[in-house]
Image (tube, rainbow, N blue to C red):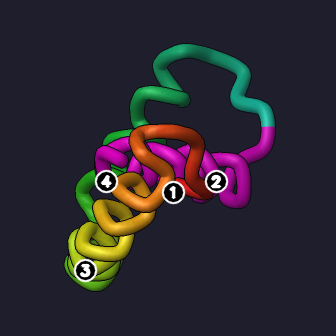
Amino acid sequence: LNPIEHFWGHVARELKRRTGLLPSKDELWNELQTILAEPNKDLCRKLIGTMPRRIIDVIKAKGGYTKW
């Protein structure tokens, strides 16, 4: 349910889309810093905005599996 998990999924997809395979840890670190420095207000708002729906789905599933 934690929105940060979905945010990290976004970061991983963005990294893959931009770079593919990077030859060194330093280049990976630099690219991650670039992605994280970008404003992601809309994405954060979207993730936070889904929390009520997530909570309702978990309650309906009685703590069991949900799509989230």
Label 2, residues with CA under 10 Å away: few <14, some 14-19, many ≥20: few
Q: Nearer the viewer, residue 11 or 20?
A: 11
Disc 1 and disc 3: Cα gap in Å?
16 Å
Tell me the CA gap for discs 3 and 4: 10 Å
The residue identified by callout 3 is 49
The residue tagged 1 is 10
Q: Nearer the viewer, mark 3 or mark 2?
A: 3
Q: Is residue 10 magenta?
A: yes
Q: Are marks 1 and 2 in contact (CB under 8 Å)?
A: yes
The image quarter in which residue 65 lies: top right
User: Which residues, given as a range, are shown in magenta?
Assistant: 1-20
In terms of depth relative to the viewer, which is nearer, 54 or 48?
54
Q: What residue do we see at 70% from left, 29% from top?
A: 22
Res. 3 mark: 4
* Residue 39 visible in image: no
CB-based contact (under 8 Å), mark 3 and mark 2:
no
Q: Is residue 57 above or below residue 61?
A: below
Q: Are marks 4 and 1 in contact (CB under 8 Å)?
A: no
Count residues near mark 4 (Cα–Cα under 10 Å), then give few for <14, some for 14-19, many for 20+.
some
Callout 1: helix, strand or loop? helix
Quadrant housing residue 37: bottom left
Whichever of labels 1 and 3 marks the residue nearer the N terminus, that label is 1
Query: Does the magenta run of residues contain 5?
Result: yes
